[in-house]
Amino acid sequence: MNASFICFIFASMALVGIEGPLDTHQSLAPGPCELKPEINPKATGIVTDDDGRIWMIGFRDASRPTVRQIGIVPLPAPSADEMKTIPKDEIITGRQQFTCKKIGWRIMTISTVRGIRTDNRPSYEHILRVIRIHGSEEKTILKKMYSRINRMALDDVNGDGIPEVAIQWSDGSLMSPGNMVDIWKIDGNGQLMPIDLGNVYKEMDAPFASHGDTVDWGLPQAQNFSLVSEQRIVEAEHRTQSIRKYYKWNSTLGRYEFSSKIVAQEQVVQK
């Protein structure tokens, strides 16, 4: 991966725009909202919260509840007020939300797709919007365009107990680095702060790697909070080498740090 290629990745990761100034709630500086349901001390079993997350609640003993997220159900169709944010030429492809009850705001992520023309040819692009609702105020705090959105999460993707906004995207070109990731933390005011993944991309340094390079996060519902990069190198005699690097979140430093690497070889056997 050469220097110009790395610069392209960093430029692609740049935040397109957080619209408008920070509001007056910023001065309160509350701690971040945790992703966990309100627990009835006498309840056990499977429950859903107001945001559609499915939780398994059990008890080791009366004072140590076991709470684990095991899934998420699709949100109902957006209301007429919510649809006012979306232009008529866009179609919603994904929608998730997180409610911070202790402060009173709600974050909603909406991905859409719309038709465009590129070099006078029909094409399309995806749009990510992050909307914060606080009382009667509804504000778009992030709007970003992507050639393609592969995966979207409003969840605790790094295992620190606090939800993040995560997007896996592709730039859609033949010279694409593959599938990359943007992640934002959500602070106690419902504001977004981008997580710097520069070290993850810098360490994708395998020579002669193919254009199938990928970064992705794990499955929080399976307690998999790693960030994983993968590079594939096509070798002679139908062999492919795969290099996977695993990163874990360091809450003290506020970043992902390298934890392990797996190198595997595959070979196509022809009859």
Image (spheres, grey):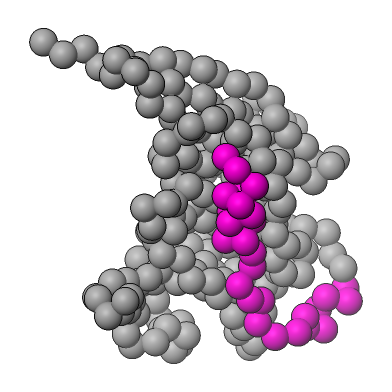
Work out whether 34 lies above or below 90: above
Residue 175 image position (x, y, % from top left)? 42, 52
Residue 208 visible in this rendered orientation of the protein: yes
Q: Nearer the viewer, residue 266 or 107?
A: 266
Work out whether 139 lies above or below 251: below
Indicate whether residue 110 is drawn in magenta. no
Work out whether 250 lies above or below 9: above
Residue 259 image position (x, y, % from top left)? 69, 25
Q: Quadrant of residue 28?
A: bottom right
Indicate whether residue 18 is drawn in magenta. yes
Q: Residue at position x 69%, y 72% from top?
A: 104
Q: Residue at position x 63%, y 88% from top?
A: 136
Work out whether 143 lies above or below 210: below
The image quadrant where one finds the C terminus is: top left
Residue 109 image position (x, y, % from top left)? 52, 67
Q: Nearer the viewer, residue 221 or 115?
A: 115
Q: Nearer the viewer, residue 39 or 78?
A: 78
Q: Residue at position x 28%, y 72% from top?
A: 123
Count of numbered circles in the view: 0
Stretch in magenta: 1-28
The image quadrant where one finds the N terminus is: top right
Residue 13 visible in this rendered orientation of the protein: no
